[in-house]
Amino acid sequence: MDIETKIDLICRPPTEEVLTMKDLRQLLETEEHPIAYNGWEPSGLVHLGTGVICAYKMKDFVEAGIHFKAYLSTWHAWLNNKLGGNLELIKKAADLFKHSWIALGVPEDKVEFIYSDELYNDLSYWAKTIIIAKNLTIARTRRTLEIAGRKDTEANYVSDFLYTPMQVADIFHMEVKICQLGIDQRNANVVARELGERLGFWKPICVHHHLLQGLAKPSLWPIPEGKEREALSSAKMSKSQPETCIFIYDSPEEIKQKTRRAFCPEKTVEFNPILDICKHIIFRERETFTIERPAKFGGTVEFQSYQELEKAYRHGNLHPQDLKNALAHELAIILEPARRYFESNKEAKECLNAVKNAKITR
């Protein structure tokens, strides 16, 4: 495969940012199968963002010939007190994450799944963590706390400050050349770029993908100019708010109920979660998006691109409820293979039930 095709796959939406294109091109010119990774705190059920969006990028990278490592960071979840700090339950959630991506079509034989314990039993990992911590100030580390889903004022324990040095050490210990994570993980990846060469490692490339918005109205609305990124980070889809996100296991009726209640202001396309899902999932899966409606309301309409859909909605030519109904219908079809997988795979079903019955603490 030629380099341009590889770059197209790596940069394919939902990719939102690459640091930097020059570095990416140089890497692909010198390494045929560089290592990329994404890392997750396994801490609950898998929604559209953690599941579908991340699966898209894993499949893109695999197709591009990249050695992709899916890092299930059970210790980071434990440090962050997810699932009540129950490490055994967190490990069960890690298994659920793995099953979820496989259910969504991620090729199990082409993605390397890694659990924290595989790294942390190696003393050299902790040496890297200490070296990185020694080169990070408290103030700099505090500013990275967004990666753990915290505000900089929420660091109350020494362990909170271990989170970033450990995440950066993960990158170098796994020999990662491309950090492929959500845009909310940007701060830690930039630390890796800043420190890598200085500490005798390398400067990893960062490929950040879009974060799906939760279905609820943003806490601050309308969003003030200049606060867009902050607002999106706080409004992202979160498994700890189950009524505002769609899980990949949800039934068609559950999907319909959640979309019916979703925030979807008429003629407004910015920070509209229904349009966000259409853009990043429906038009990734479909060349044509069909919206059925009674003849008295304009009849059935087809859109060949997201841009067409957005224009119609902005101009008031499409009612929010018609859009919601069509989205729910398509999502139910897209997620059908995942529902079948969890019905037929005994181990996956047991993991799902265990996590469903757990208390999601954050």
Image (spheres, helix red, strand yellow):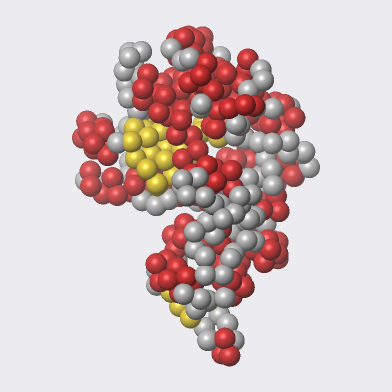
Query: Image height check: is 194 above or below 332?
Result: above
Q: Is residue 133 visible?
A: yes
Pick out the residue farthest to the bottom: 296
Asked whether 58 or 99 is in front, the reply is: 58
Q: Position of residue 174 (x, y in %)?
A: 43, 23
Q: Position of residue 196 (x, y in %)?
A: 35, 19
Q: Is residue 326 visible?
A: no
What residue is shown at x 50% (from left), y 78% (from top)? 317
Query: Image height check: is 241 above or below 181?
Result: below
Looking at the image, residue 287 sits to the left or right of residue 102; the answer is: left
What residue is shown at x 63% (from left), y 15% (from top)? 158
Asked whether 108 or 92 is in front, the reply is: 92
Query: Image height check: is 80 above or below 49?
Result: above
What residue is shown at x 60% (from left), y 69% (from top)? 324
The quarter in which the C terminus is drawn is: top right
Q: Position of residue 184 (x, y in %)?
A: 50, 38
Asked whether 309 or 63 is in front, the reply is: 309
